[in-house]
Image: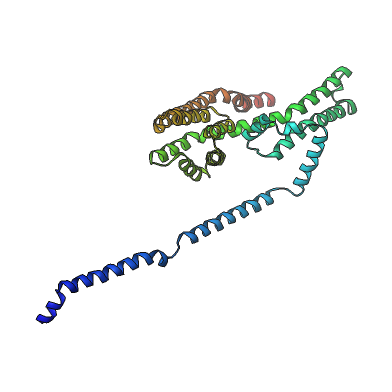
Amino acid sequence: MDEFAAFIFDPAHIIMALGAVGMFLGVFAIAAPFMQKDQLSPRLKAVAERREELRSNMQAKKSRAQRPGRKETLNVVNKVLGRLNLKNQIDDRDLRMRLAQAGWRGQGPATIFVAARLVMPIAMAIVAAVLFFGLNLFKLSFAMQCAAVFGGLGLGYYLPNVVVKNAATKRQEEMTLNFPDSLDLLLICIEAGLSLEAALTRVVRETGENAPQLAEEMGLLTAELGFLGDRRQALNNFAERMGTQEAKGLVTSLIQSETYGTPLTVALRVLSDENRASRMSRAEQKAGSLPAMLTGPMIVFFLPVVFIVLLGPAVIQIVNS
């Protein structure tokens, strides 16, 4: 027993044991990276496969949404507009921006708009000529018939603009209604420590079902912030696509925050309070105008029924007597 203890506690043996342990740990430290399983490559591969799957699904959905022959029709229309020297109108930035405000992007809507503005005046003039000259509707004089044909010509020219303007106004109203909620969520994400791009991505993911138009615009803003070299240009593009005062106020706050280093959360909180107050003011204005709007329907539909109920029996008695 004493010999065993002396063997264990011998300084030479202890130094040899510690050296062996150190050598083993050194070899293990060198070999450990080569023994570990690569976990990043399967994740990257899964992400790439998922991205490819989503891209193929989007392309399939887009191809199903397009009507048969749409591409061929657009090609024919482009050729006709090219021969008429109207291709520059399709590439007009103001036209593209007005169509983008209505939710129509790409060359297809611009081509259809220019073609409609070319064809609609002729079609409306022909319809007016058939109605007033061919069928002699309302039996107007020759001067009034000519005026009606020219009126149809002007109506056909301005009708596409009216359609685009109405679609843009309706879309802007829907986005303005949902803008304060999205701004509150953006403020919460930024206060939680997320960057602007990450916060916008989270807002897009959370508001995609309730506010698809606004989520689409914020998604485009996130993409442009990531790919454009000038962040201010991306923000200005977002404000132009939205076309609302709320979006312009948000863009101004973001630009000032990045330029002067002011706290973004303070500016967003003030902007959120202003947007909520503005939305409440619009709701109160609509509620205040409701009695005046109900006056006409009440006169047309309600008062005749009251008169019939009140005076009906007396009229029946007078007729019977």
Q: Residue furthest front?
A: 12
Q: Is 195 placed left or right of 133 in the picture? A: left
Give the total of numbered labels.
0
- Residue toward you, 143 or 1: 1
**Residue 193 in which image quadrant:** top left
Q: Is 216 placed left or right of 10 in the picture? A: right
- Residue toward you, 11 or 4: 11
- Residue toward you, 31 or 170: 31
Instruction: Give the answer, above or below, for where 7 lies relative to 210.
Output: below
Name the colour scheme: rainbow
Counting from the top left corner in percent of width and height, residue 58 is at 62, 51
Counting from the top left corner in percent of width and height, residue 80 is at 82, 37
At a point 44% along the width and 40% down the height, the residue shown is 195
**Residue 263 in which image quadrant:** top left
Q: Is 211 placed left or right of 39 in the picture? A: right
Instruction: Give the answer, above or below, for where 303 lies relative to 65.
Output: above
At a point 40% along the width and 63% down the height, the residue shown is 33
At a point 75% along the width and 46% down the height, the residue shown is 71
Q: Where's the C terminus, which quadrant?
A: top right
Q: Where's the N terminus, which quadrant?
A: bottom left
- Residue toward you, 215 or 228: 228
Counting from the top left corner in percent of width and height, residue 18 is at 23, 69
